[in-house]
Amino acid sequence: MKDELQKPLLTIGVLTMNEAHRIAVCLQSASFADQVIVVDSGSTDDTVSIARQMGAEVFSYPDWQGFAVQRNRLLQHAKGKYIFFLDADEVINDSCRKEIEAVTQSGEDAVWKIKWRIVAFGHELKYLKSTAYVERLFLRDNIKEFQGVVHEKAQLRNPHVKRYLIKNAVLHSSRESIQSSLNKMTQYVMLGALKRSEQGKKGGVCRGLLSGFTIFFRLYFLHRGFMCGGAGFLYAIFHALEAFFRYAALEYDRDSLKFFAKR
């Protein structure tokens, strides 16, 4: 990490929960930043100790209230003029780092999106077409807060700033195993159902089947998942199952959704 006495230009922030098996690689890729922050949600493994060994500032908030709340807590500790949000399952390569550094030197008030190189079940999905661009780099003072229980979004003081895409992709280890994917699917199914419930949307099996089929067809065929072997199929089917159960839960578990979000 850079000299703490130097005025921070870039903060990189990471949310964690039991990420001991990969947090060191993630934070090593972020070590070029002036400030690296980890906000932990109550890990029971060695995530916190490893993060501190890597030189990150670690803050623990085990009272889980959703991704947006954790990001807002992270913002309270950010001192950099710019802030980049990095997930614990992501790695910044050298080419991407150079782009980020060039942005921070520019002084421009804008929002920068990233794209992913997906790794799933031990294989990089080299032929998968990436169309999911997420906003990750901001001028810190332009962020009012984050909102949303899942796939949270930054609310900006000046929402009309320009949007750019960082050309070099971030390596994203999306799904490491069947077991972890099943666990992750449960969390995102219920949080996604809660989000749609708050929007007044309706659920049901038929809606779920339509959503799941659409997502599978898009990922496996239109986005070339079929060219990535078994890992490509598993990647597409897990996304499809998540979409299906999201609408099923919205119909059949509606009364318990808010309870799950607080777990």
Image (cartoon, helix red, strand yellow):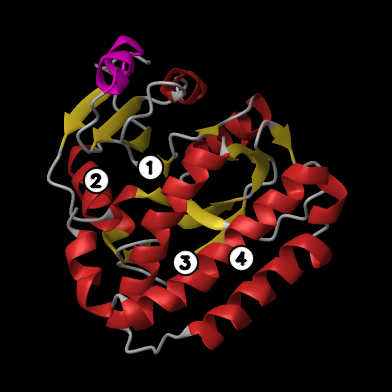
Task: Reply yes or no: does residue 50 show up in magenta.
Answer: yes
Mark 1 or mark 3: whose residue is earlier in sequence: 1
Query: Is residue 101 rendered to the left or right of residue 63?
Result: right
Cα gap from disc 1 to disc 2, whole angstroms? 9 Å
For marks 1 and 3, give the one nearer the viewer: 1
Mark 1 or mark 4: whose residue is earlier in sequence: 1
Pointers 1 and 2 in contact (C-beta within 8 Å): yes
Cα gap from disc 1 to disc 4, whole angstroms? 33 Å
- Mark 3, Cα crowd under 10 Å, few <14 / some 14-19 / many 20+, is few
Mark 3 or mark 2: whose residue is earlier in sequence: 2
Q: Amino acid at mark 4?
A: Ala
Q: Is the residue 224 above or below the residue 246 in the image?
A: above
- Mark 2, Cα crowd under 10 Å, few <14 / some 14-19 / many 20+, is many
The residue tagged 4 is 240
The residue tagged 1 is 83
Quadrant in which the N terminus appears: top left
What residue span does the magenta drawing correspond to?
45-56
Question: Which element is circle 1 on?
Answer: strand
The residue tagged 2 is 75
The residue tagged 3 is 161
Pointers 2 and 4 in contact (C-beta within 8 Å): no
